[in-house]
Image: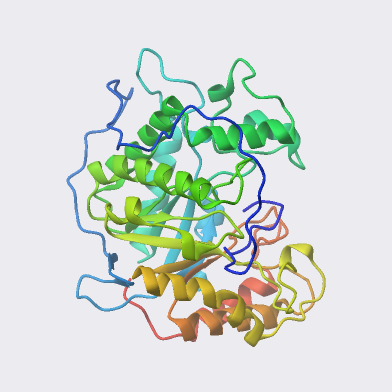
Amino acid sequence: MRTTPYLLASISVALLAAACSGGGGDAATSPPAMSSGSSQGSSPTPALTSPDVRVDGPLFVDADGKTVALRGVAVHTLDPVTYQQAPALGVNFVRLAITWSDFEPTPPVDGVHHWDQARLADLDAEIAFFNAHGIQVLLDLHQYGWSPYFATLQRGGRANGIPRWVYHGRRFPLTAAGREQAQAAMYTDRRATQLYSDFAAMLAQRYRGAPNVIGYEILNEPPLGNLPRRTWAIQRIVRWQARVGAAVRAVDPERAIVFMLPPRIDVRAVQLTPLERLGKIALDVHDYYAGTGKRYRTTLQGGTYRGTLANQASYLAPMVSIAHTWGIPLIVGEWGAFSGEPGVGRYQQQMVTLFQQDGLSWSRWSLDRNERLGLLTRSGQPTPAAVQLGRLLHSMPQQPG
């Protein structure tokens, strides 16, 4: 999630002709191995197990091959007081945000990673809690504001994702333009890509035996930075995600690898071959569209919801179509509106109806008590929107979990 609207890739928007900054070559030309260094305090590798829910062509299916629609919420906390409220909503799915900057606050020393063991133990407990309640988990390698290095650019001074230490030495100015440069550079930075891949592979190695972990999302809302909205730039991001995904796949060949595309691009021009080679892939899109018929009007702009189900369906249709063409599952990994805004109940009813009609998996942003999109009050009580969402979920046919 981020403060500026991150809309679905649109097939109707003309490509921009902005120039790209120079790069040091594509970092995604070959799959990386794990770094030669080890991880301090790393646990023994658990035996690989099949996930409870897996990708089978365009579907998520259970162990019996029955189609599963994943319905749930996004969670971005290790606080049990918050995440333990998920079962009461009736969810069977959680998209769980995991940020590299939180789990590796200091750089590797002599090739040895120093993961935050206390955080990993808390994450273990959270995943185990969800497993005990039949809730599937997608590990979302999240970024918000790109990096704590650029936190001063964010409202509230909060950012996460790429660790601050990656940019030690002030490689990029602390400006919006500097952040865009850093974002674009990530996709051709071999060292940073290898370190990121090590983090992703560490998670895969740790949770390859967790039956309710369905997969790993390579990067939340991958930004173009100062790259142009041109096919070659999009393919660079696709190849980068495939490179990181290859490090994951080398450790865990069973679970889904979930990818995203930058917003407002011509998805028909995207070549998925680098990702298709990994197998068991799925596409995540984020949909905050306000349903008014005005393409760039979003629920993140607030105000009374005046959208229609028909407009919401029309807006989402291109991504449903492209996922069908590619033969892969589609997840609407984020959607939502500010709690307390007039019409939020109608909005949620429309979206859940639409997802059910299209047979889509989804997670509502978010189970949180500190932000406007949160489903909890500051005291931790369910908001009226959460209560309604729970009623909608409980009224649906039971899904395998």
View extreme (top): residue: 110
Depth check, front residue: 88 or 45: 45
View extreme (left): residue: 47
Tell me which colouring the rendered structure shows: rainbow
Whole-percent x and y of residue 251? 24, 42
Q: Is residue 341 above or below residue 38?
A: below
**For residue 309, what is the image quadrant?**
bottom right
Does the image show residue 218? yes
Whole-percent x and y of residue 48? 19, 49
- The C terminus lies in which quarter of the figure? bottom left
The residue positioned 49% from the left and 21% from the top of the image is: 106
Total label count? 0
**Residue 154 placement, left or right of 9:** right
Depth check, front residue: 125 or 104: 104
Whole-percent x and y of residue 146? 60, 39
Depth check, front residue: 59 or 376: 59
The residue positioned 56% from the left and 55% from the top of the image is: 82
**For residue 263, what is the image quadrant?**
bottom right
Whole-percent x and y of residue 70? 41, 71
